[in-house]
Amino acid sequence: MLRDACDQAGIDARGAEPIRLGENAILRLPGGIVARIARSGQHAAAAREVRIARWLADHDIPAVRALDDLGQPIEAHGHGDLLARAARAPQRHPRSSRNGSAPAARPARRQWLAPVLRAGAVRPARRTHHRRHQPHRRRPPWLHHHLATLRDRYDQLPAGLPHTVLHGDAWVGNVVATNDNQVVLLDLERASIGPPEWDLVSTAIKHTSFAWITAADYRDFCHRYGHDVTTWDGFALLRDIRELRMTCYLAQHAAENPRAQPEAGLRVTCLRGRNGPRPWSWSPAS
């Protein structure tokens, strides 16, 4: 797939090195190019991400840059491939998980962002629904019921901060800090319009649900952002949706990697109320 996409783009795929193999395969190519291979059926999402990346570039917002002069995404064997320019300096994820995702979670407050992005409203259960209906997986009744309950609750989501542009998956793995002190946003496929609390919950549950960060770390994050989402009446609902998405992601990964099956089983047990109260002993996905 990668070779086919690179051939279409006139780029040499030799020497490709994997960066991250998760929901998408991300590989480093010669010449400072990064390729991302999406799962099949995600061409429309990849096209949307290219459009958003180019809009961000036009407005000098530091984010992943899609290669110019290419008709992207490139279709290869049913997969949408995205070719992007790597950050312009050696890069790392921010050392501190307590505040590294704050730039991604911070909302764009200018109202003109929404019509330009044309990102659409956030749909928290969308990818959960897609993973749930993968044909090679059984679909237990409890999962149907849990997802339906969350959807009904989301229709009654309490009012919170004004809706704005969201990153959609604002965690530290989607933020890169370069050695020239620039923070760059990655993985724009879930950018959308909605409640900023949706992005904030990703960091909050690292403390409240899993104890991956300390109370002091979380307080520092809230101070830097200027808001504590756990004080909002809708927090528990968005927390529950995030936890389900994280569980479905691991279940999808476990279907291809048996070593992930114990962790996927643990997450299911917790969601079903069979492993005591939070915080739970989940391990971060690699």
Image (cartoon, rainbow, N blue to C red):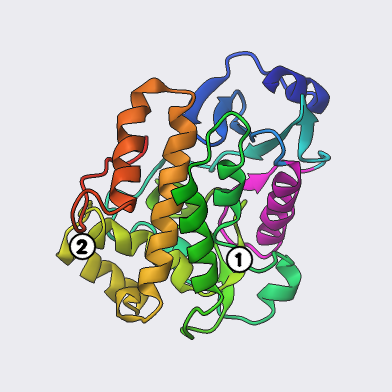
Instruction: Please tell me which residue lies in front, 79 or 241.
Output: 241
The answer to if 60 sits in the magenta stretch is: yes
Q: CA distance from mark 1 to mark 2?
A: 28 Å
Q: Is residue 134 left or right of residue 182?
A: right
Q: Which residue is mark 1?
A: 122
Q: Which residue is mark 2?
A: 217
Q: Say what amino acid the circle numbered 2 marks.
A: Asp
> Judging from the image, what secondary structure is the residue with disc 1 in?
loop
Quadrant for residue 136, please give it.
Answer: top right
Q: Say what amino acid the circle numbered 1 marks.
A: Val
Q: Residues within 10 Å of mark 2 (few under 14, many from 20)?
A: some
Which percent across, then down, holds residue 89? 48, 41
Instruction: Please tell me which residue lies in front, 195 or 63.
Output: 195
Q: Which residues are magenta?
A: 43-68
Which percent across, then down, holds residue 169? 49, 55
Q: Can see residue 176? A: no
Q: Residue at x 74, y 74 (%)?
A: 115
Which percent across, then down, holds residue 149? 49, 65
Tell me the chief SS of the magenta region: helix
Q: Can see residue 56? A: yes
Tell me how many marks there are.
Answer: 2
Instruction: Please tell me which residue lies in front, 221 or 21.
Output: 21
